[in-house]
Amino acid sequence: MDRGIYVALSGAVLQEKRLEYLSDNLANVNTAGYKKQKPVFEDAMPPADGTRVFSVMSEVATDMSQGTTENTGRKLDVAIRGDGFFVVNTPAGQRYTRDGSFTVGTDGTLMTREGFRVEGEGGAVRLTSPDIGIDAQGNVSDKGASVARLKLAAFNSPSALVREGSFYMPSSPEIQPVAPGTDTQIEQGMIETSNVNAVRAMTTMIEASRSYETQTKMIQSIDDMTRKAIEEVGRV
């Protein structure tokens, strides 16, 4: 068998992986705070003779660029302008998100839509009325009285964060959160939309699909040539 078929096979497998992440990005085009994922590929030389080049996926990078903000007018919707993440307390530990579409629990605790507690500088943020205000520094007021300050965290290497469901977490214990820069601000009544460009993602998906078809046709062609060679050699 022509070992070149494995080169085409590796290309087909990677295009399949690429389509998987593109589909995930498109599925979250309307998810607040979502950051698109990009698979990173590289060449891998076989150890024997180095004549054939295989493709491997080296990592999946998360594009942490700012999404556009959308005015909702809802007091519990907040967006981060600049670097940083909201800190969320989950059963698995602290996690981070850019999705600021919050709700209030039955006990008045500020929660994410998934039902996890949003952290303040002093712990849980508890509210007693719908008359709340949140300023640019994240200070929360209830009926005009200051009650808490939203806890924000930034990372020197935000690309090292990995996605866990709808949240993010550091890819290793060495990556620790730091205080956001002075230019980071909170905007009440706003939501940061996904940074996925739907048109570009669809175009890229068509490109990846065609590339996948090309790779599978190449596999079929090599297989046909191998079968033909075996049959003709057999006749001789």
Image: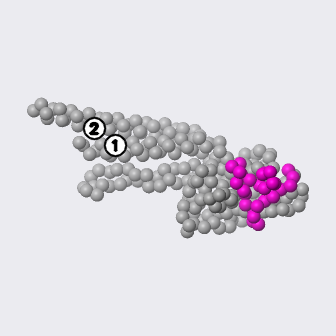
Q: CA distance from mark 1 to mark 2?
A: 9 Å
Magenta residues, as a range?
Answer: 104-130
Please identify the residue farthest to the left as the structure is shown: 236
Q: Position of residue 4 (x, y in %)?
A: 28, 44
Q: How many marks?
A: 2
Colour mode of the rendering:
one colour
How would you rate the neighbour count of disc 1 (Cα within 10 Å): few for under 14, some for 14-19, many for 20 or more?
A: many
CB under 8 Å between discs 1 and 2: yes
Label the magenta part by its dominant secondary structure: loop
Dot 1 or dot 2: first in sequence order is: 1
Hey, which residue is sitting farthest top in the picture?
235
Q: Secondary structure at mark 2?
A: helix
Camera sees residue 139: no
Identify the residue position indicated by label 2 in the image: 222
Badge 1 element? helix
Quarter of the picture holding the N terminus: top left
Compared to residue 35, the image places residue 153 above or below, namely below
Decide whether residue 143 is among the magenta residues. Answer: no
Q: Amino acid at mark 1?
A: Ala
Query: What residue do we see at 76% from left, 61% from top?
Result: 124
Q: Which residue is mark 1?
A: 8
User: Quadrant of residue 87 in the image?
Assistant: bottom right
Image x and y of residue 210, in percent: 43, 36
- At a point 67% along the width and 54% down the height, the residue shown is 98
